[in-house]
Image: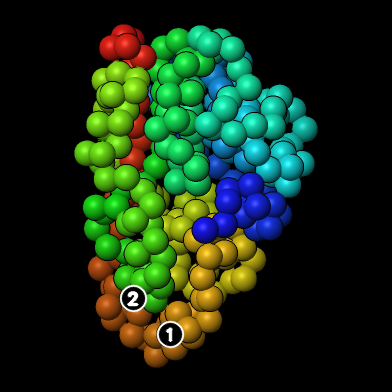
């Protein structure tokens, strides 16, 4: 399996263009952070979802990603989730957005978040018991198989969090049809987008597979109308639950 830093050094070059934070997802993350005045963003990448109006410090292992952080972004330290370069209890909250599946040791990374945060930990992640997604079920089943093995189940994740940090609450994050953050499921109502090599270059799942056969099937089904016939119900929806979840975990049981 490709390591996170090597993976993003190879594919992360278009992240600033195609992985622009979606304001609705940003609002959910900001709400979960609560009254935290200072935040560390772990696996920070190009700085998506770093909240405004708070003191933010970023931690990111990939130089390619760090170089794409815009002028005025939060200061960024090079480092990994499993060994955060911060002192104990040095920030109010620790956040990690769509990154825990790249960590080499999930429990150690979560314990590090608990070590440096005084109040809470906030995660945006995906759960493998989600309703099947047409892209991975019909065209790229190898992505679905990989993700179901890589991501912890909701019960397993909550158990780890409550063992290492404190009480945890998980809530769905419906994905809008016009989502501006181009992660794997973002284009659920825009299927032709997945045919773009540039769009796929900012989605880590595609870096692990040979996508040509699946793309050929998708291209054929779009041209023939078969995709529309099978997925017509999606075209009337504005948002869709695709398995993305916000998790808020209070350090030692404190809640505010």
* Separation (CA) of disc 2 from disc 1: 9 Å
**Image height check: is 210 above or below 105?**
below
Query: How many numbered marks are there?
Result: 2
Q: How crowded is mark 2: few (under 14 residues within 10 Å), some or many (20 or more)?
A: some
Residue 189 in view of the camera: no
State which quadrant residue 32 falls in. top left
Res. 217 mark: 1
Location of the C terminus by quadrant is top left
Who's the residue at 43% across and 19% down the image?
114
In contact (CB < 8 Å): disc 2 and disc 1: yes
Residue at x 49% of width, y 80% of height = 215
The mark nearer the N terminus, 2 or 1, is: 2
Work out whether residue 252 or residue 234 is closer to the camera in this orientation and state it. Answer: 252
Q: Is residue 197 left or right of residue 161?
A: right
- For the residue pair 171 and 40, the one nearer the viewer reads as 40
Return the x and y of residue 37 as percentages of the image width and height. 52, 11
x and y percentages locating residue 104 in the rendered image: 50, 42
Image mark for residue 138: 2
Task: Look at the image and name its color scheme.
Answer: rainbow
Look at the numbered disc 1 and give the secondary structure of its residue. Answer: helix
């Amino acid at each position: 399996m490709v390591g996170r830093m090597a993976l993003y050094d190879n594919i992360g070059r278009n992240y600033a263009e195609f992985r622009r934070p979606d304001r609705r997802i940003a609002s959910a993350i900001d709400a979960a952070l609560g009254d935290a005045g200072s935040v560390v963003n772990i696996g920070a990448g190009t700085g998506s979802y770093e909240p405004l109006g708070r003191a933010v410090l970023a931690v990111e292992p990939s130089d390619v990603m760090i170089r794409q952080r815009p002028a005025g972004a939060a200061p960024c330290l090079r480092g990994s989730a499993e060994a955060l370069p911060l002192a104990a209890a040095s920030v109010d909250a620790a956040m990690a957005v769509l990154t825990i599946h790249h960590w080499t040791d999930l429990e150690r990374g979560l314990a590090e978040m608990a070590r440096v945060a005084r109040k809470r930990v906030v995660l945006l992640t995906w759960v493998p018991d989600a309703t099947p997604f047409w892209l991975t079920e019909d065209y790229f089943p190898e992505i679905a198989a990989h993700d179901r093995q890589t991501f912890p189940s909701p019960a397993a994740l909550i158990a780890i969090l409550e063992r290492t940090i404190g009480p945890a609450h998980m809530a769905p994050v419906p994905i809008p049809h016009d989502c501006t953050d181009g992660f794997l499921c973002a284009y659920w109502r825009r299927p032709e987008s997945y045919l773009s090599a540039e769009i796929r270059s900012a989605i880590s799942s595609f870096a692990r597979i040979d996508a040509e056969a699946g793309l050929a099937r998708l291209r054929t089904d779009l041209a023939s109308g078969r995709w529309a016939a099978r997925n017509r119900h999606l075209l009337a929806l504005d948002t869709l639950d695709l398995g993305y979840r916000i998790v808020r975990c209070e350090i030692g049981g404190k809640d505010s």
